[in-house]
Amino acid sequence: MKLFALPKLLKQKRFGKNVINHFVMDTSHVRVKSMELQNEQLLVTLEDESVLCIIHEAKRKKIPAYAKVLTASVKPTLKLLADNSVEYKWLKFPGIDTFNPEIVRQSWWNKFHFVEEDLSQNIMGLRKPQIAAIYNILSHWKVGEGIGTVVMPTGTGKTETMLSALIANRCEKLLVTVPTDPLREQIADKFIELGYLQDKKFNIVESEAHKPIVGILYENFKVSEDLEQFIDKCNVIITTMDLISSGTPEIQRLLAQKISHLFIDEAHHVKAPSWQSFRNLCKPTKVLQFTATPFRNDGLSIDGTFIFNYSLKQAQEDGYFKKINLIQVNEWSNEKADQVISIAAIEQLRSDLEKKFDHILMARCNTQRKANEVFKIYNQYSEFNPVIIHTGISSKERSESKQKIISRESRIVVCVDMLGEGFDLPNLKIAAFHDIRKSLPITLQLAGRFTRTKADNSLGEASIVVNLRDSDVTAELEDFYALGADWNSILPRVSTTRISQEIDFNEFLNGFEDLDSSKIPFQSLTPALSVVVYKNKTNAWAPLNFEEGIPDIENLDYLFHSINRKKQALIVITGKKARIDWGHSKDIYDIVWNLYVVYWETKNNLLFINASDNTGSYRELANALIGEDSQLIQKLDVFKTFFGINRVKLQNVGLKEWLGKNSSFTMKTGHDIEKALDRASTEKAEKAFVFGAGYENGKKVSIGCSYKGRIWSRSKADIHDLTEWCDAVGKKVIRDDIDPNIILRDTLTPNSVSTKPASIPFAVEWNEFVYLEPETRITFLLDTNCEIFNIDIELGVEIESPEYYFNLVTPDQTVKLRIKLFNRDDYNDFQVEVLGNPSKPYFVQIGKKQIAVETFFYEYPPTFWLVDGSSICGNDYVQLKQLIKHYPKDQIIGRKWPGVDISKEAQGIEPKITDSIQYHIIQELKQADFDIIYDDDYSGEIADIITIRADEEKINIQLYHLKYGKGGKANTRIDNLYEVCGQAMKSVNWVFKDSKEFFGHLMRREIKKRKGKQCSRIELGTKEKLIQLKDWARRKFPVEFEIFIIQPGLSASTASIDQLTLLGVVESYIKERANIRLTVISSE
């Protein structure tokens, strides 16, 4: 008997754009007993004696009376079955109209088997994480509480886990939501065919079990009855989160009522409030969230209970991920980077294909414009027939391009965002990052995409090509893009750490009671860091008594509270209707919401109260919670929060001034702060509040405190971080050994001036704004364009002028500028002028914004440092409070300078000036044990010489500032020190810049150029070592700095008082601001 392949049977019914699919029968082979041709109908008698009628598709309007009818693409003949090119479709099938969701569901009874994969025994089945996840899901549905979250890395079988849960539990009505349209199509195909669960090689679900009837929603129903009819005909409904969110409340309520279970796929995507409200309509225990990365880029967390977490480390150990080979290129030129990346990627593709690995290369870009540019590069390799995919081309073109990849007609695809979430092609094994993904969730998903395995095929290892130059990433991603990084060890470690943090936060939230009853999701709460603090005279608290401490509670329209007894935290949310300002309708009103976060810190027995309205001391609430003996921490004690913060700059001071029996309040900002603090030190005024910023533990922080007891920062945080901030505040305010008066006494406060102070300027430096910006963002458009890392700002020649002069020095020109102070109408101001009548206006480019040079220096005026330690920035004149000590003469290292002409400072470019100070010092440093010696001389320098050395505990960076001796010999001239002291002070700013900026500066300037000549600035070491040290500084070792002033024109034995005073100013500034030692080297 002949074998005949019966086509698969997919029944479809449309409701507008929405469609219901039922995969009734897969392709199967039957034995043919006999055939006869009657009236253009081929009647085929099968082995079981049933008759199959085949007609031409053109005759389909007249359906024969036979139970089984197929249409053929050609007219039937007795030789029809021998023609393999004929396409068949079912027109009629016995019992097809009798199927309904309940019959399908009943067919699943006892048809699911926990078959575990064992490749050593050639047993195909469910993977270990899939079986574990299914058991946890079934257990959660039986005895669990709340929403369940399942964490499975990309590539470990998340979709088949969903299918298994559907069949094993015999879910009545399952709704599956996905974030994107392409993922809706992909997951719908899986549910329609039940993935591989009924594949004979697996036999996880018996063939007698009917496949689910799957409805796909593409548009919302306008009439709820139509939706109800649609749902009634389905076992599974699949749609997107956005579509549900856009439905009417009536449609959402009906959908929530009709479904029995909800699966949320890719749950890490941002959740709109409307989507949240729909999810809250569903029974929490029947809601499952599936994700590979349970944390979001917007900083919010995924709620629900983590019922299963299969770590990336476990997946790696269990062999579900192939090894990743990281191919690193190092190209600092933006123009060449894409070409260099493509060459490395193509080389890897050719190598893999030669080894018979069926690999595909994906080149990933951030934008469509970049993708189009990169495609031109890859299109040169015509033998691989590259294609491009992004939303800028038609859906038809995208579909055709994907098909070319799948069929291997193309081996290279250039795309934006990894072909869309959920695209499943294990043969994608080479990734070329033309733009680095700068978020951890996307990085982890990408890793899963490229490292997944296939049981029936040896795919080889994955390769990822990155440019080390393009590594401006978040701290948690720094390890991934370090020189020599091993993704195979970094991925599981970083993923496990990040997911553990989410689980900790989730457990903190789950410690609160009745969270589901809150109208406002706790994950989205980001209270301001602002509290009042009470000393608890008892050893307990009564959080349930909070109602006694909230005023007018009986008139509230909404009240919710939750207690975390383990963490001793209470959250209260209140809402009250309020009249609108623009009308008098009773039906239209505002709701005024208030949030209270109360935390009892048991170690120091302190009660912290945070409230969204930030008014009052909440004494009634404190009394209700810890008793009427509670004691508010206020008055001078709150100013203890400034303890440990260095070089504090006050920004606001509020004063309460006493005039007889009356008092008045004044707030002072900027220039008036100095007077305000002076008055606060007398009996006529007290500090009402103080706010400022400074440096604590190497980080810039802000802190404010009020005499009445409020303590705050400008930051916001989630409620977990708020409690940790409270812990840090509590440690200070409880200490008896801190004197708050002393803390504020030496704060730096500006006075506004309209005339130049008497003290002589010795240095000028960029405004703080410049140091906070990446160097690559600021370019000066002068006679030629020059990036800021190649520009110096230097003090101009003043000759007792009433103005301040400074110069911009580039490799090609010097631009002279002047700042003139004046007073107009009792308002102090200043003006910036470019001198010398340039041939065109000069501009500064900051990112994409362009402003005139004069405007730039008016908005961001440079700071002039004066020899008495004071400084002036625009009109703001800041004097030091304490007396500056002279630099100890006995600490100056005096030495001889044999073979050195001390009137020659720089060594230049080949041939080097061998009798210069710089050349001589470099040769001496080469005798020591440094990893890098770097010549950073010329415009834009950090220092004249930089040395870097790493040991087992830290990275030591030494900055050497050199200056030639005026007159060619040592003397007591103070101007011998002006420039070198200014350079030393300016270099302190690099201590506070991110290490990637410091090392990026060195990499960008690695080639030293002057007058047509060039050479490497690296005097000792290699570029590769410099990159390695950059990576160590960012992720492994702490960095410590030392600063050296080398001036042979200074004599250690005859240094003048003026010289020692100036060195004392520099030493004090460097020590107080950065806690760095200054070393001075001179002549004897």
Image (cartoon, helix red, strand yellow):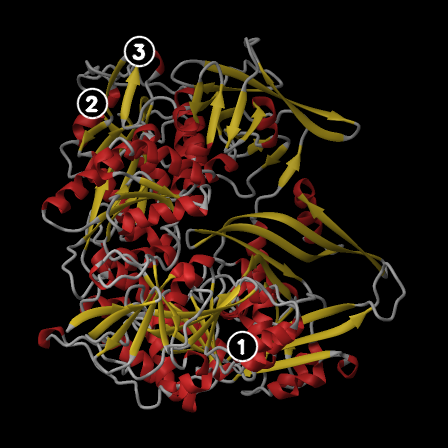
Q: Mark 1 points at which residue?
A: 231
- Residue 1030 seen by the camera: yes
Q: Mark 2 points at which residue?
A: 920
Q: Mark 3 points at which residue?
A: 1011
Amino acid type of the residue that numbered disc 2 sits on in the rendered structure: His
Amino acid type of the residue that numbered disc 3 sits on in the rendered structure: Lys
Q: Distance between the residues labelled 2 and 3?
A: 23 Å
Q: Quadrant of residue 824?
A: top right
In the foreground, 171 or 339 = 171
In the foreground, 72 or 1044 = 72
Circle count: 3
Residue extending furthest right?
584
Residue that appears at 30% across and 61% down: 76
Amino acid type of the residue that numbered disc 1 sits on in the rendered structure: Ile
Residue 894 placed where, x, y %? 26, 29
Which structural element holds mark 3?
loop
Residue that appears at 44% across and 30% down: 1062
Q: Which of marks 1 and 2 is in front?
A: 1
